Image: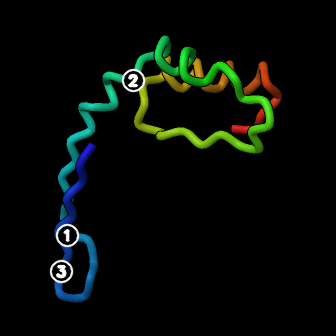
Amino acid sequence: ATYTALLDGKGELVGAVADMGILDAISAESVSRRCGNLAGTGLVLCEANLSSSALEAALKRCRAARVPA
């Protein structure tokens, strides 16, 4: 993913462009495969721009492992 911000002379955001297309490649299945063992994990943080199915898969794994997300 890429993000480009346009700032004014005071450092204030004027505009921004983001290409988040790569996040579409992260499916619920890939999340389930890669988050199989959460034992000993204290906390899971997720990119909020993932698809709802990918986020649901992550939350399901966290609930099963009793890990806060």
Q: Are marks 2 and 1 in contact (CB under 8 Å)?
A: no
x then y, percent, for residue 17: 18, 52
* Residue identified by numbered label 2: 26
Residue pictured at 54% horizontal, 26% vertical? 55
Label 1–label 3 contact, CB within 8 A: yes
Residue at 60%, 43% (x, y): give it: 45
Sequence-wise first label, 2 or 1: 1
Location of the N terminus (image quadrant): top left
Q: Secondary structure at mark 1?
A: strand
Q: Nearer the viewer, residue 32 or 4?
A: 32
Where residue 51 appears, as percent x and y from the top left, is 42, 24
Q: CA distance from mark 2 to mark 1?
A: 30 Å
Disc 1 from disc 3: Cα separation? 6 Å
Which of disc 3 and disc 1 is earlier in sequence?
3
Tell me the amino acid under the disc marked 3.
Answer: Asp
Labelled pair 3, 2 in contact (Cβ < 8 Å) = no
Determine the residue located farthest toward the bottom in the rendered image: 10
- Quadrant location of the C terminus? top right
Is 64 on the left-hand or right-hand side of 25? right
Residue receiving disc 3: 8
Side of 15 relative to 35 (left or right): left
Q: Secondary structure at mark 2?
A: loop
Location of residue 21 by image quarter: top left
Q: Secondary structure at mark 3?
A: loop
The amino acid pointed to by label 2 is Ile
Residue carrying label 1 = 14
Q: Position of residue 36 (x, y in %)?
A: 65, 19
The three-letter code of the residue at mark 1 reads: Val
